[in-house]
Image: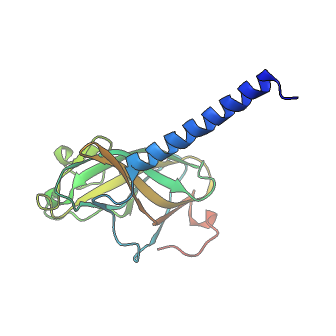
Amino acid sequence: MITRRRVIVAVCAVIVTVSLVVVAVQLFRRIAGDGPLFLGSDEFTSEFGSDAPIGGTVVWGGIIAHNQGSDPLTIERVMLNSAGDTSGVEIIGFYIFDLGEREPDGTTVGLGRQWPPPYMVGANFHPAVGFVIQPDAESPDGYQIIARLVAAKPGEWLFSSYSVIYEVAGRKYLAHRDDRLRICIPDRSACKSTERR
């Protein structure tokens, strides 16, 4: 016999399920993957490897960003996506600068251990979250997003990719790129893989 309580429970379960589906659909609509932020062709992925002593700084500048749209975009979040356990590395933050405003002898940042990178000028170095990237028509050299990390404990720690959530004209987008970052602590002997570039 179906009791009134069971009916109420069943109805509540249906309502919750429908609500979750609606939220998921709305989230999918709010964060789209076809936006104007270009992080490089997926045909050219790479792997970067660095060693660092415990407590040492690792600076990685693998993210080159171009706004291929006609409107400015605002960065809301930058993520390094782990490939397994990455508890041995602490992510301090992400920073950005306009590559068109580098010092005359400046190049892009690859991997380093000095913070901030030696050729940076303070006025051109900003926290990435909240930063507005202008269209390529205004900044054709693009922007470089730099991750600042700290080596926390011994081991081999691998990040598989990175993602950027951003907003353009009230709509959220997600940009993603598969580039690997391998960090060996306290030195390269801690890493099992020989695939380091």
Look at the image and tell me whether residue 123 can be seen.
yes
Q: How far across and how far down the image is residue 59, in percent?
A: 39, 55
Q: Is residue 12 above or below residue 117?
A: above
Q: Which residue appears at 30% of the width and 54% of the height?
A: 117
Measured as percent of width and height from the top left, residue 192 is found at: 64, 69
Q: Nearer the viewer, residue 178 or 17?
A: 17
Left or right of 64 in this view: 106: left
Residue at 31% over, 58% down: 35
The N terminus, quarter of image? top right
Instruction: Residue 106: give x, y in percent of width and height.
Output: 20, 63
Q: Residue at x 59, y 49 (%)?
A: 88
Q: How is the image coloured?
A: rainbow
Residue 116, position as x, y percentages in the image:
31, 49
User: Which residue is outermost to the top?
Assistant: 5
Of the pair 195 and 119, the residue shown nearer to us:
195
Horizontally, residue 134 falls left or right of residue 145, namely: left
In screen coordinates, is 14 left or right of 124? right
Extreme residue toward the right, this view = 1
* Among the 4 quarters of the image, the one containing residue 108: bottom left
Can the viewer see residue 78 in this picture? Answer: no
Residue found at the very far front of the displayed protein: 1
Label count reads 0
Instruction: From this view, report whether residue 9 is shown above or below residue 174.
Output: above
